Amino acid sequence: MSTTAPTPSRPGLTAATSLALAALLLAAALPAVAGETAGGAEARNKQKATEFLEVIYNQRQLDRIPDFVADDFVDQTPGAPPPPHGPAMVRRQADGTFAAFPDLKFEVKRMLAEGDLVAIHWSSRGHASVAMAGGAVEGRPATVQGISIFRYDEDGKIAESWDMVDRAGMMQELGFRFVPPGGEKAAGGEGDG
């Protein structure tokens, strides 16, 4: 009969190894958890941006603007209307847009999110109203393209926005011409001899 010596037990080594392994696993999981949290907020903000455009601009539920826009909202676009800021300003902008294009509809082309920012490439189409250009373009269709960037606050509302809109393309589509400072002659138009 053969006898083997018992293997020495090292309970401290086993506990230390277990703790080290748990710490390594936790350290590896933390970036994934943080990414999932940030990714979850980004996905939420993209959904909110899509819903904002649909509810406010396509369905014309303007009374719901405060559901999407923070009380201290500021439009950072150069040339944006002066205060008051917040939902009241967004309402004024929407009212003006719908006065010019009563049947305007927005379509999201693409959307990106990073942290608390959402960038939306959109296109809109509608027919000009009689109020535009004194009625000279009444009923003419126009497409407007642009990019809007929204910053969301901790409550999930739009706190700031920046817009880049192709207004020149829209005006050309409506039949407006751009004349350089020197007039028609400088543009090579009528009056050239």
Image (cartoon, grey):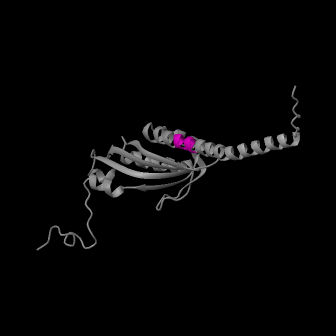
Decide which of 154, 127 is in the foreground and name it. Answer: 154
Residue name at image x 17 percent, y 67 percent: 189
Q: Is residue 130 visible?
A: no
Residue 191 locus on image (x, y percent): 14, 71
Q: Quadrant of residue 157?
A: top right
Decide which of 61, 20 is in the foreground and name it. Answer: 20
Image position of 26 (left or right of 157): right
Residue name at image x 88 percent, y 30 percent: 3
Image position of 190 (left or right of 64): left
Residue 63 locus on image (x, y percent): 53, 39
Residue name at image x 60 percent, y 48 percent: 70
Image position of 125 (left or right of 88): left
Magenta includes 47? yes
Image position of 191 (left or right of 75): left
Decide which of 57, 154 is in the foreground and name it. Answer: 154
As drawn, the residue found furthest toward the top would be 1
Residue 137 locus on image (x, y percent): 27, 50
Find the magenta span and give its range.
42-48
Residue 73 locus on image (x, y percent): 58, 52
Which quarter of the rendering shows the N terminus? top right
Dominant SS type (magenta):
helix
As drawn, the residue found furthest toward the front would be 1
Q: Is residue 179 visible?
A: yes
Residue 36 drawn above or below residue 3: below
